[in-house]
């Protein structure tokens, strides 16, 4: 599933493809992923409008319109964007496409149909309603530590809860915890303050490095973070701890014990 760095790449793609483009029509072939209305109503609201900006908050991309409204693009597990002109280039699992005045089409593809597309009258109200926490690239150390204060949940669940901070999901949480040597089942309030600060710093380091590399979640580099260690039996840097996997916070999680200490 695309997490913050991958959605940031989608933002860059969207900006290059769609900003300042007038929408002449919206071709909806399957409106299951359109949550705010049926496909015809969704298309009607967008015809004649222009995308003027985009805003990313965690894993959510908001495409802002010239009337002050927005289109929410949440990519789910298999969402994707493709700009094209000719029918033979249409994505196989395209669910809808924005057709622009310049003749280009921006298709939204989603094989598994877990994406969520909404037409929003008020983007900020939606963020409040969803209780989205501060963006993981924007949050400061003090705010991060305050979010951890008193938490009796495990650290993996802390990361996955988007009201704590928005943008970190299963894969980047595992990466940060592997690099900071913290077991993902550790109880947050038991983690020492020094180690909590280390977790914050490593989260920033990993996310910034990932964003700079503009990852595409369907095709990571061979030496991408977790490609180097996140599989059963791999030896941790101590040369003796083996990576294992299991369900933590409801997600398949990887760790190496005792390389990663459980607090």
Image (cartoon, helix red, strand yellow):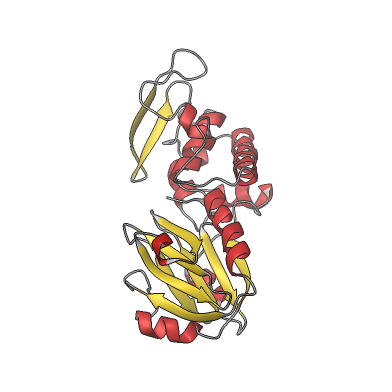
Q: Is residue 66 visible?
A: yes
Q: Position of residue 192 (x, y in %)?
A: 58, 34
Q: Is any part of residue 134 visible from this angle?
A: no
Position of residue 172 in the picture relative to residue 193 (left or right): left
Q: Residue 235 sits in which quadrant?
A: top left
Q: Quadrant of residue 193?
A: top right
Q: Residue at x 50, y 82 (%)?
A: 46
Residue drawn 39% across the image and 60% down it: 91
Q: Viewer-proximal residue, 10 or 154? A: 10
Residue 40: image location, x then y, percent: 37, 84
Q: What's the residue at 40%, 32% (across, down)?
A: 254
Left/right placement of residue 46 relative to residue 96 reads right
In the rendered structure, the answer to whether residue 167 lies left or right of residue 52 reads left
Identify whether 75 is placed above or below 252.
below
How many numbered circles are shown? Answer: 0
In the figure, 19 relative to 228: above or below?
below
Q: Nearer the viewer, residue 181 or 67?
A: 67
């Amino acid at each position: 599933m695309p997490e913050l760095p991958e959605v940031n790449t989608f933002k860059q793609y969207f900006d290059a493809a769609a900003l300042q483009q007038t929408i002449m029509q919206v071709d909806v072939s399957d409106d299951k992923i359109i949550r705010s209305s049926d496909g015809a109503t969704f298309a009607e609201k967008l015809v004649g409008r222009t995308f003027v900006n985009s805003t990313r908050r965690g894993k959510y991309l908001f495409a802002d319109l010239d009337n002050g409204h927005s289109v929410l693009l949440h990519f789910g597990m298999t969402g994707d964007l493709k700009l094209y002109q000719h029918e033979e280039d249409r994505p196989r699992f395209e669910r809808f496409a924005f057709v622009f005045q310049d003749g280009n089409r921006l298709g939204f593809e989603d094989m598994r149909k877990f994406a969520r597309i909404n037409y929003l009258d008020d983007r900020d109200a939606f963020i409040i309603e969803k209780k989205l926490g501060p963006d993981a690239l924007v949050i400061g150390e003090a705010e991060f530590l305050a979010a951890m204060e008193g938490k009796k949940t495990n650290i993996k669940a802390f990361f996955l809860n988007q009201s704590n901070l928005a943008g970190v999901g299963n894969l980047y949480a595992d990466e940060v915890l592997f690099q900071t040597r913290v077991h993902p089942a550790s109880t947050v309030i038991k983690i020492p303050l020094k180690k909590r600060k280390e977790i914050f710093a490593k989260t920033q380091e990993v996310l910034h490095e990932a964003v700079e590399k503009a990852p595409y979640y369907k095709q990571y580099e061979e030496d991408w973070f977790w490609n180097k260690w996140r599989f059963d039996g791999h030896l941790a840097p101590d040369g003796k701890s083996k990576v294992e996997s299991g369900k933590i916070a409801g997600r398949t999680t990887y760790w190496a014990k005792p390389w990663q200490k459980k607090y």
